Amino acid sequence: MQPLPSLIHDLHPPTSTFSSDTIFEQSLTSIFGDARNQHGEPGEFVLYTPSDSTYLHNTNSGVAIEDIKNELGVGGEDAELEELEEYVQEVLKGGRGVKLRLADAVRGETGLFASFVWNAAILAAEMLNGTAPPTLPRIDVQGKTILELGAGTALPSLVSTLLGAKAATVTDYPSEALIGNIRQNVEMNIPETLRGKVEVWGHCWGILEEQGQAEVEEGIRAPTEWVTVKKGAYDVVLAADCMWMGDQHTNLAKSIHHFLSPAGKVLAIAGFHTGRQKVADFFRVCKEEGLVLESIVEVDVEGGTREWEESRGWEDPVERKRWLTVGVLGK
Ligand SMILES: C[S@@+](CC[C@H](N)C(=O)[O-])C[C@H]1O[C@@H](n2cnc3c(N)ncnc32)[C@H](O)[C@@H]1O
């Protein structure tokens, strides 16, 4: 597996890459080896290419935008963007990448952290794609029904659909900005012939009564009967970087348990940037809600794995940020 941050390429105009913030971030990365765990900017676009992309390289290397520009012999700024867009379209047509729009930042909703792609989602995509280290569990989505909770850009759902899932339901907090953006990402990446397999709904974790759903805006929220009809209906439930709010653990675990089929699998991944304790607490709450933790492992952004530990004493925040937990749950 290529390092997770190297699989996401910013597609915003080159001029905006020279903001002082970006330069500061880049210097942190190079001076302190600080792994980026969130990618993109609200309202901007990024391209995900899996580790085994072979479009420009026949080796197992990820595609870097700088390489693309060199390859294309790109000239002036406008030409550069045009050529870049052409390249992106080629990648999408060939099914070798996924173009993602990041949701606009809306006042009052920035605390949801939905306007970025997080490393957890990239790792989920790599695992589904079969390009993650073999030490990680294999989740087969072919012919399966998929539910994603707290989807953000919906990268894992899009990859699942392109890989042959039977149907995918993508959900996030019921906000126009988030749900509208996910629908746009579906349109950009899923060919019309497959689009009928994907539905996108607002679902607030833990709201499992039809009445509660009805309080959310029509057209954004899942239809009122959805929570009942889809009870126990999903073979695979995906949750990437959804564990950082302790007061939402029970709600999230309740939604997972409600929608998961009796023999279904949950892939729950989270980075440690919000602390190890939060992750440990979430898996404990899952058990209390009737879920069984089948496997759990720690993986770093470069694919190194080690055993899961509930506590590792004091952890250097920069080092800690390089690690994620991958949990597989069942009923
Ligand atoms: C850190 S982001 C992760 C986004 C995406 N899964 C990823 O890894 O790139 C957390 C996601 O959980 C969603 N979320 C937060 N609270 C929620 C709630 N109570 N109900 C539903 N979704 C929620 C946010 O809108 C956001 O998309």
Image: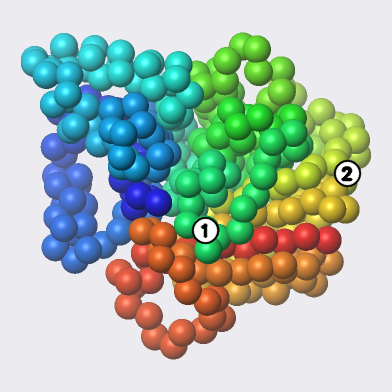
The residue located at (72%, 61%) in the rendering is: 329
Q: Residues within 10 Å of mark 2 (few under 14, many from 20)?
A: some
Q: Residues within 10 Å of mark 1 (few under 14, many from 20)?
A: few
Are discs 1 and 2 less than 8 Å apart at CB? no
Instruction: Judge whether residue 258 can be spotted in this image.
Output: no
The residue located at (74%, 33%) in the rendering is: 143
Q: Is residue 285 left or right of residue 281?
A: right
Q: Position of residue 269 (x, y in %)?
A: 56, 57
Quadrant occupied by the C terminus: bottom right
Type of amino acid at the residue the image marks with label 1? Pro
Q: Earlier in the sequence, mark 1 or mark 2?
A: 1
The residue sitting at the bottom extreme is: 313
The residue sitting at the left extreme is: 76
Residue 3 higher or lower than 12, as above or below = below
Q: Is residue 38 left or right of residue 83?
A: right
Pointer 1 residue: 134
Pointer 2 residue: 231
The residue located at (36%, 59%) in the rendering is: 302
Type of amino acid at the residue the image marks with label 2? Lys
What's the CA distance linking mark 1 and mark 2?
32 Å
The residue located at (61%, 69%) in the rendering is: 296
Q: Is residue 308 left or right of residue 171?
A: left
Q: Secondary structure at mark 2?
A: loop
Q: Position of residue 324 (x, y in %)?
A: 47, 63
Label 1, ligand 1: CB separation under 8 Å: no
Q: Position of residue 116 (x, y in %)?
A: 42, 42
| Colour pattern of the rendering | rainbow
Q: Secondary structure at mark 1?
A: loop
